[in-house]
Amino acid sequence: MRLGGHTLARHQLAIALSLGCDRVIVVAPGGLDGLLPLQHAAEKAGALFHRVTGAHGIMGLVSAQDEVIALGDGVLAWPDLAQELLATPTVLVQPVERGVAAGFERLDFNYASAGAMRFPGRLVERLSELPGDVEPFACLQRIALQGGVPQRSVPDEVIAQGRWNLLHNEREIQAVEPDWISHHLFDDGPLQPSEWLAGQVVRLAGPALLEAGSGGTVVAMAAGVLAALGLVAGGFGALTLGLMLVALAWLGFACASMFGRFERRSLRLPRPRLAPAVIYRWIVDAVLLVLLGLAHGERGYVAGLFAPLMLLGLIRLVPAVVASRKAAWMEDRALLALVLSLLSLLGLLRNGVAVLAVALLLGGIIMAGRQNRLTPA
């Protein structure tokens, strides 16, 4: 089963790596072929990878000094919650009525399993007392409880919000997929209008693109084509059309950035040295600079670049200096390109660029002054 273009096992591996595991053991019958992507991901993250066919195969890979984190088949948990709830040795449980209804194993009269636990490695040797064909997770869970590992209930609000699941089929995956994607897309900070709109697009179209294996790559390429078409349109004198194409290109780049953010966060991948979003911003700014330079061409191309350079420079500078939700909107290149296209349509583009630059400068000065007054000496 796949969620967001990756198997549930890959998402469980991300949880294990985020908890600091340096050895990954997968209990699976059959060959290794289907597990090769999982093995490559684990080894790339610096963890050792092992496949065993049954419970007894685990014993030789765990020492008494180890701590073991075990995840049941089909369990999907929000990674930040898993890190919090499995920070210390514990067997995660939940109320029996809700847990059994969701498909989790019943433990006793009051509790059902929550499909995850952390326990001392010395308990693994007790598997030798059991037949080799037992279900490993269920047996280890019983051994952990008998060995005195404390129980911990998954909070009610976590279950109610659907942030801890046991998935059995594609229908259940499709039910949780939009929330799973949203959780990894958005920060608590202010969003540009384009970022919000890109997030909605990724929520709707993202699963299909991720499942196809393309993700943000195809979207970024399409956005690059739109930016190039904007340049061509501007070169033929259609500045209004060119600026509108740039607005669409920025929205495409924002979608591509969202795809990258989702995969990086959900799979716990390292940040790239140069974020693609930085490259996208430079591309769009360069196209805007050329188009605005064409609009000021009668003054001489070099002289005509002064006002556009000031405008684009202030759009980068003011939000970096002023911490404000409103300032974040200034970085939205789609919004800027749409405003410029409207000015072009009305025949006010050249003067409008200068007015926008002055407005940005004054707004930045005013917001910086207010921010300084609110800062204690």
Image (cartoon, helix red, strand yellow):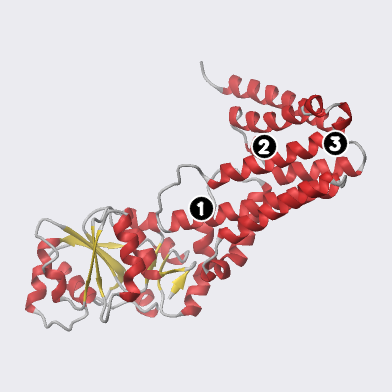
Instruction: Give residue 155's quadrant in the image.
Output: bottom left
- Amino acid type at circle 3 is Ala
Q: Which residue is mark 1?
A: 261
Taking 90 as reference, is 312 above or below it? Answer: above
Q: Residues within 10 Å of mark 1 (few under 14, many from 20)?
A: many
Which numbered disc flags the more N-terminal residue, 1 or 3?
1
- Tell me the mark number nearer the camera, choosing from 1 and 3: 3
Q: Residues within 10 Å of mark 3 (few under 14, many from 20)?
A: many
Q: Pick whichever, 44 or 61, lies toward us.
A: 44
Give the SS element for disc 3.
helix
Query: Is 236 left, or right, of 67 in this rendering?
Result: right
Q: Which residue is mark 2?
A: 326
| Outermost residue to the left | 129
Q: Which residue is mark 3?
A: 295
Q: Position of residue 355 (x, y in %)?
A: 82, 28
Residue, x 52% and y 54% (percent of image)?
Answer: 260
